[in-house]
Every structure is written in structure tokens, then in C-alpha cells.
Amino acid sequence: MMTTRNNMKHLPAGLCCCTQILTKKAGSDTPSAFIRGGHSSKLKRFMTTSDNGSTFPIVELRQYQLHPSKTSLYTQHTAQSAPLRKNLPLAFFGFPETGGIALNTAVHLYHYPEGHVDRLEQRSTLAKKDEWKQYLGEVKACMMQQSSGIFVEAGLVNDFEEVKGLKYWIENDGSNNDGPGNHNNNNNKGIIELRKYQLKLGYDTVPKFLQSYSAALSSKLNAIGTHPTTQLATVMVGDVGSLNTVYEVWKHGGKISIGDSEFCGLHAMEQSRIASRGAKEWRKGIAKIAELAVSFDTTILKPTEFSPLR
């Protein structure tokens, strides 16, 4: 799909933020973080592609604000129905401990490899199941508000070996590593850090952000003193809902491998933050990013026992 300035106004709103990337030619100074995947469209410079190269995977971020007195009941029923939810497929499910997202909010991420049609088909199939209807009847009264937004994983997810992307975490479901009958979430010391950048309006703001971010990321990932459990799971860009929004999803703490002892996620996060402050290229990149951002906030999330990413 080739695009020019003259027909930008005809693009769907979710694509407007990446039109500058679409018009650049191969061989330009666009970083390789935007040039991954097998799709022939220039959109591949901006986002990841599906295995068949014909559609773009999407990520859905859903947030359910729960009544404080009914959070435990909701969690209990949701854990029992987890196998149904995982078929969507589920990448992450957890609750905030502190930060920008309100407490008692169920935060979940879904990765649809074949895009919007895939999401529609998966959710329609699930809605017809009697077990799902029963579950909804049990938890509906627990929820006060629901929201959903669609994101795409930035192409840089494919550029850095350390950044696995959400598909990896679904395929390597961390909730299966505890062994049967050992799903007590209180034993899991790992946390997920959700870092949100709200950027200024403009067609070229997101590409500029990703360019600066990609150029500096290696410096942060390899900063001396970074905790061995710290991993960047993915970077997501808003496509439907809040536009010019970028999320980083970081994993801290937990086990390095099966059989290891648990590391405290908060301690690991703090150690890695201190290490990143000594990464000169990262500090330079953040200075450029700060000029593009309107606001920045972080949330510490506690994964549930059935969350693949944990």
C-alpha cells in the first residue's frame, strides 16, 4: 500500500500516525527497526507481520475496572475459566499494584496473529460457548467499567534478539512452568512494568519516537548492572483508540529458568533502572523522546497464576 501526502486524509485514523514511514523508500535512513517481516507493503517498516505475511498481527489491551469488594470473586471465577480465555489467545493477565492504572483493574493483553478478522472470529466463537456464557453471568456484576484498545507491535520487536514479542510468551506459557497443582500466585515474585508514552499529535511523531528509541535501546538492554531477569517483552503502538500512544512492556524478577529460586521483581526493576542511567546512548535517546512526549507514566502489574507472561 503506497501512500502520498495527497491521499493521507483518506486513510483510516489508525494508520495516520505511520504515513511518514509508508512513503519512505528502501535504502533511506529509516532504521532497520521499521523494516522487518515478510509483507511487501511499506507498512512492514512500522510494525511486525504475521507468519504468512498477508496480514498484520494486532494486540488488544483490555482493562476492566472492578468493584473493590468483588475483585476476589472476579479473580476466582476468571482463574477457573482461564483455559477458555487462553484460546483467544491470551498473552498477559494481571492487576496493578501501584502506578498509573487504577487499583482493582483487570489488565489483559491478547495477541491476534491474523489481525482484526482473527480477533472477530476468535471472540465470536468464544461468545457462543456455554461455559463462557456461564462465566460472564458469574462476573458481570463485578465489573463497573470496561475499555479496549488495539495496538500493533513495533517492527523493532523483530530486530532485537532480547525482545521476544508477545507471541513468544504465548507459545512459552510461563504459567505452565509451576507444575500441576502449584499455581499459587503468591509464590511468584515477578512483576510486569507497563510504561506508557503519550506523544504529541502529528503524522511523524511516532516514527520519530521509534527511530530515537531503536537507536538507543541496545545501550539500555546491555547496560552494566542490569538485573538478569529484566526483559523487554514488547513495544506497542496505538492503532485504534488512543493514538500516538506507545507502551513498553517489561518483565522483572521471577525465575531465570525452571528450578531456580525466585527473584523479587521490584528489586530487579530498581537495579535495572539504576543501570540504565549509566547508559549514555539511552540517556541521549530519552532526551530526544522527551521532546516528543506529552506525558509518561508507569504501572507495576502483578501477573495472575494463569498469565503466560509472568
Image (spheres, helix red, strand yellow):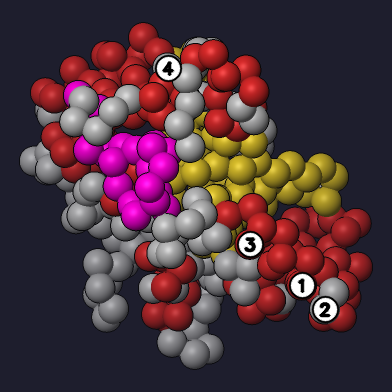
Magenta-colored span: 29-49
What amino acid is at disc 4?
Asp
What amino acid is at disc 1?
Thr
Above or below residue 309? Residue 66 is above
| Quarter-of-image position of residue 213 | top left
Q: Earlier in the sequence, mark 1 or mark 4?
A: 1
How far apart marks 1 and 4 lie (CA) works out to 38 Å
Q: Judge from the rendering whether residue 225 lies leftward or rightward of residue 83; answer left or right.
A: left
How far apart marks 4 and 2 lie (CA) works out to 43 Å
Q: Earlier in the sequence, mark 1 or mark 3?
A: 3
Reading the image, the residue beneath label 2 is 129
Which label belongs to residue 118?
Answer: 3
User: In front: 255, or 87?
Assistant: 87
Residue pushed farthest left? 224
Query: Is residue 239 something one can see in this rendering?
Result: yes
Image coordinates of residue 216 in percent, x first then y, are 19, 29
Q: Residue at x 55, y 24 (%)?
A: 16
Residue pushed farthest top? 291
Q: Residue at x 81, y 42 (%)?
A: 145
How far apart marks 1 and 2 lie (CA) works out to 7 Å
Above or below residue 142? Residue 226 is above
| Quarter-of-image position of residue 43 | top left
Which label belongs to residue 204?
Answer: 4
Which label belongs to residue 98?
Answer: none
What amino acid is at disc 3?
Asp
Reading the image, the residue beneath label 1 is 125
Magenta: main secondary structure equals loop
Above or below residue 216? Residue 153 is below
Please tell me whether residue 30 belongs to the stretch shown in magenta.
Answer: yes
The answer to the question of whether label 4 and label 2 lie on touching residues, with beta carbons closer than 8 A, is no
Image coordinates of residue 94 in percent, x first then y, are 57, 56
How far apart marks 1 and 3 lie (CA) works out to 11 Å
